[in-house]
Image (cartoon, grey):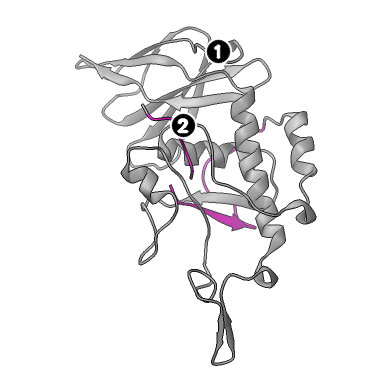
Amino acid sequence: MKYILIILFCFLLSNKNFGQKNNQFKDPEITEMVNNISVDSIKSYVYKLTSFGTRHSCRYIKESSESYLKNFSATINMRPDRFQRGGDHKPFNQNGFTAVRFSEYNEDFTRQHQDIRKENNINYGDLPEFVNYNYVANVAKMNLITLASLAKAPGQPKKARMKVNLSNITYLSWEGPKTGPKPKGYYILLRETYQPLWEKKIFVSDLKVELPYSKDNYYFGIQAVEEDGHLSQIVVPAPEI
């Protein structure tokens, strides 16, 4: 596998909150770090994370940040990129890396990819006086929350498998993570095949589970959780015939 992640095309919204409920877990240390980010402290931000599936990355970012941020959220755009423009994440995707991108929901096309100029009394170009620093500060907080949450979480579960047989019962098994804090247990995540976000979480303490949900109708994910509630990267179990 390749281990770099920059950012699928997460749209950022203020004053909106779409999708799944957050897990309500808030780490005091992460909360303090978020509160210490002010508009004055924002000079730039980079799109970097550790590696896991691109769309799983977006879901993780959304769920983690919504526990801490008020009136600022992300929604997931499943397109690889915007029309007639390219993002920094695209060449990483094209070369097999997991990559996600943050973007404002409604872009100002007089700013993006423009030479600095004044034309027909309109100022063009991405200049500091046109930056919304409160917005950028919230984007930086979202990055911080995601990175800090991953740093405090167990490693990803290993060798996740799903038994494939003619049954409406689904059997999953996996091995514990090799790195990070010891898990207190695992969340089994479920969503119907047409749903973009995880709809249900089931906690188990074992390394296997039998679920009364058909593998034909649901996607499954497995996520380790440590004693304080920090969540690992999500792994999708591979079919095992």
Going from N to C along the chain, the mark reached first, 2 or 1, is 2
Q: Mark 2 and mark 1: span between their CA atoms? A: 22 Å
Q: Residue at x 58, y 12 (%)?
A: 183
The one nearer the camera, 158 or 192, is 158
Rendered location of residue 231, percent (x, y): 57, 25
Q: Residues within 10 Å of mark 1 (few under 14, many from 20)?
A: some
Q: Secondary structure at mark 2?
A: loop
Q: Residue at x 60, y 22 (%)?
A: 153
- Drawn side of residue 213 relative to residue 15, left or right: left
Question: Considering the image in quadrants, where does the N terminus appear?
Answer: top left
Residue 170 in sight: no
Residue lying farthest to the top in this orientation: 206
Rendered location of residue 216, percent (x, y): 26, 28
Image height of 113 relative to 175, above or below: below
Tag on residue 185? 1
User: Residue 20: within the magenta?
Assistant: yes
Q: Nearer the viewer, mark 2 or mark 1?
A: 2
Bounds of the magenta segment: 2-24
Q: Amino acid at mark 2?
A: Ser
- Drawn side of residue 214 relative to residue 195, left or right: left
Name the residue carrying label 2.
Answer: 51
